[in-house]
Image (spheres, grey):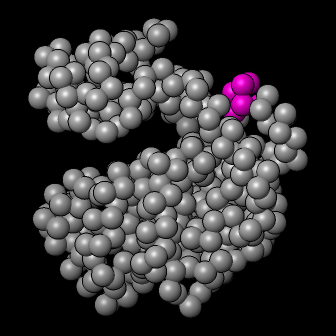
Amino acid sequence: MKYRPFGKMDWKVSALGFGCMRLPTVKAKSAGEKVDDDEAIRMIRYAIDKGVNYIDTAYPYHEGYSEVLVGKALKDGYDRKVKVATKAPMWLIKKPVDFDTYLAEQLKRLQMDHVDFYLFHGIGHKSWHDVILKYDLLKKAEAALQDGRIRHLGFSFHDEFDAFKEIVDGYDSWEFCQIQYNYMDVKNQAGTKGLKYAASKGLAVVVMEPLLGGRLANPPEHVKELLAKGRSTRSPVDLALQWIWDQPEVSVILSGMSTMDQVHGNIRSANKSAVGSFGARERKLIEQIRSKYMEKIPISCTKCNYCMPCPNGVDIPSNFELYNSAFIHDDMKTARRTYSRFYAEKERAGACIKCKKCEEKCPQKLPISELLTKVHAALSEGKSA
């Protein structure tokens, strides 16, 4: 296993971290699925035996069971071989004491007396102001650092670069952050600018979604053809991972592994990872792949946000981005699931009242109200667009 610096800490992290959001499952006796304990524990312990020393979980993963499973997997001395990261459920914190309540519950689930790395989960501009600052949670976290319940404090992030910079600059004692980053997200969310900015401030940077929820692992036919023409000897997965590991600002890549085959493959990739191992030909291939994906975009929204705020609360750029993503990756099913699960009803394209105030401000002169109708039909009813 290759190891990399982790910010300013006197400790090196394995290039690959085990993300416990997509553990193997089996059908439950009741409806739905449950984690396959034996297989998940076997996979986690195998990865640790092969040198993985960073395990990432969170309060809501697998409906709260991921933390319990991690606690089980790290019995028999495995807890001494790794550092564990978990996250405070920001959406559930309604008053200052909730920070301590949820942390206590998480420690109980993990069967641990402390968490090595504790993150404010999935924050952005709104949760930074309306939760962390409002309830003085940095002070709460500092108390937990002082009494040893947590060892290092950071945050995971889902918003735009300006919010990322505000949060990084808003607290002097961050030690690490976690961002969504892959070769398609160089300008989305924190992006490459955020990666470099955090590293310049001495923060370790943990990368999540390196394969964009698995979509880059199984590219559509038009991208497979480009890979074949480029004569790459790497698999789509290895190509995507090595592109990230080639960047010195990256501390560790998290992979949410669901099968032992994925563990084997990712460990093989991690073992040959290195800064500077990605040649000019491969960088050019990545640029060509990115361009090929982008050719599929049906709505030419640049996310300039001039259309915002919508008087009726619709998140116009986000709806367009989700719709575009469905076409880029030939994956309308995932887009529909995201639309129904993670978009509040007032934020969805279907809440547009066609006042057209947004169209007056759009530099691209897009027929926004017409497009939102099309987006809502595709994402909510399963109609072809």
Q: Where is residue 312 in the image (x, y as percent from the top left)?
A: 13, 27
* 272 relative to 299, above or below: below
Badge count = 0
Residue 376 visible, this orientation? no
Q: Can residue 364 be seen in this snapshot?
A: yes
In percent of width and height, residue 305 lies at: 27, 38
Identity of the residue drawn at 13% across and 65% down: 134
Residue 223: say if magenta.
Answer: yes
Residue 103: x and y in percent read 33, 70
Q: Nearer the viewer, residue 280 or 278?
A: 280
Q: Quadrant of residue 6?
A: bottom right
Residue 227 figure quarter:
top right
Q: Which of 320 and 115 is in front in this view?
A: 320
Q: Is residue 366 above or below residue 26?
A: above
Q: Quadrant of residue 314?
A: top left
What is the span of residues highlighted in magenta in the rendered image?
219-224
Q: Tell whether position 79 is magenta.
A: no
Q: Is residue 17 left or right of residue 383?
A: right
What residue appears at the point 35 percent right and 37 percent down from the top-left corner? Answer: 303
- At 62% from the left and 35% from the top, the residue drawn is 291
Question: Does the magenta stretch mainly form a helix, a strand or a loop?
Answer: helix
- Which residue is at the front of the view, 137 or 312? 312
Looking at the image, residue 3 lies above or below residue 307: below
Horizontal and vertical percent position of residue 298: 48, 20
